[in-house]
Image (spheres, rainbow, N blue to C red):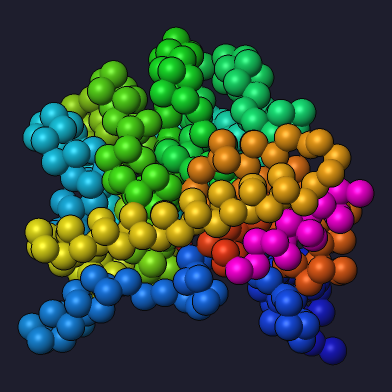
Amino acid sequence: VSRFDGVTMAPPDPILGVSEAFRADTNAMKLNLGVGAYRTEELQPYVLDVVKKAENLMLERGDNKEYLPIEGLAAFNKATAELLFGADNPVIKQQRVATVQGLSGTGSLRLAAALIERYFPGAKVVISSPTWGNHKNIFNDARVPWSEYRYYDPKTVGLDFEGMISDIKAAPDGSFVLLHGCAHNPTGIDPTPEQWEKIADVIQEKNHIPFFDVAYQGFASGSLDADAASVRLFVARDMEVLIAQSYSKNLGLYAERIGAINVVCSSADAATRVKSQLKRLARPMYSNPPVHGARIVANVVGDPTLFNEWKAEMEMMAGRIKNVRQKLFDSLSAKDKSGKDWSFILKQIGMFSFTGLNKAQSEHMTNKWHVYMTKDGRISLAGLSLAKCEYLADAIIDSFH
Ligand code: PMP
């Protein structure tokens, strides 16, 4: 007998579990479209050149490994807020943003959830249906109640905008509305600029607090500014906004766990107090954040040459994904004789495409075709090469029948 006999077996993670199954498959045609991590056309992981250059600089300078302050590296916090809001945004000059370095996007969301739990007892977070699977885990573990608003319309494989608006309206006044800044995960479907304005209208009317998850800035469109437009639109309306950031995708720093939580407040005084409480929440959880990724970001953003090289590499990554998206669409349209309209694939943006495959069809993709993907029909285009688009198109068409 073990004292841990009462501990039951946890289910595998629906996203990370896909990679485990993929590794166990010996078929040569196997494809891992589960996890959202950028791969080269040869389907190999990619370390950005600017990251290597920044790391070399850090070695040459002999940077030490002393603890960071609880709130993280000052140069990183400055750089990350400026990237998000734009360097000359009044909220930065007026010191109305509380920025704290977090353990990438996930850890930053978790810190914000802890702040909500402590200072907004009973307040609800409303999240899109569907959303990134970990959002629910994060709010559950932080004991923050949540419910869903309509987002995805299976009939059009597009946005259910009317449903979204009416559900946000129906949420209790003062709810937190979780929004994906760009490249909505898992659907790849983003609101248009006009729709963002209407979403902001409703959130303001209802006195809700917008809470952005920005995991793909620069990685979706290739432009850091374009991908931050949604956040900036809300900030320009003088709203108080929460924003979690991640550098996993846009700088390829997945395992470095680098990101930030930003809270835009209506006064500098409120921002100071919020920041002090974020630090207080972080201290007993992990004490202080890791330095390596923070230094990489600070060095890349702080050096005009490296910054431009980063932008070029980001465009390259976003461009490869766009090419794969186009090729997949072309292959599906050419091969499928049913007359189905596949143009929804081209309307989606970012790393993911929602195929519209259901659970049984997604399982068929894996069991027959060795294509590993989440059961919601999401595929990561970052794990696809141009060379494998035709194979994938055959698999998708077969699985729909
Ligand atoms: N939010 C969304 C929507 C994501 O897709 C991801 C990455 N899959 C994250 C947050 C967080 O990732 P990380 O913790 O690696 O920054």
| 178 left or right, relative to 11 | left
Q: Is residue 258 visible?
A: no
Q: Where are the magenta residues, as a range? A: 387-401
Q: How many marks?
A: 0
Q: Residue at x 44, y 40 (%)?
A: 182
In the rendered image, the quadrant that contains the N terminus is bottom right
Q: Residue at x 34, y 55 (%)?
A: 315
Q: How far across and how far down the image is residue 124, in percent? A: 56, 31
Is residue 195 in the magenta section?
no
Residue furthest to the right in view is: 401
Q: Nearer the viewer, residue 27 or 123?
A: 27
**57 to the left or right of 315:** left
Name the residue at 73% across, 65% down.
Answer: 391
- Residue farthest toward the bottom in the current orientation of the protein: 1
- Residue farthest top in this picture: 205
> Residue 382, percent across and down?
53, 62
337 or 319, which lies in front?
Answer: 337
Instruction: Please determine whether, in this image, residue 291 is positioned above or below residue 59.
Output: above
> Which residue is depicted at the point 32% across and 25% down?
233
Q: Main secondary structure of the magenta part?
A: helix
Would you say residue 127 is visible in this rendering? yes
Please identify the quarter of the rendering in which residue 301 is found.
bottom left
In the picture provided, is 193 more to the left or to the right than 56?
right
Which sits in the foreground, 114 or 52?
52
**Residue 335 x/y as whole percent:** 77, 51
The quarter of the picture where residue 115 lies is top left
Q: Is residue 164 above or below residue 385?
A: above
In the picture provided, is 152 more to the left or to the right than 291?
right
Q: Residue 172 in the image: state x and y as whole percent.
A: 57, 18
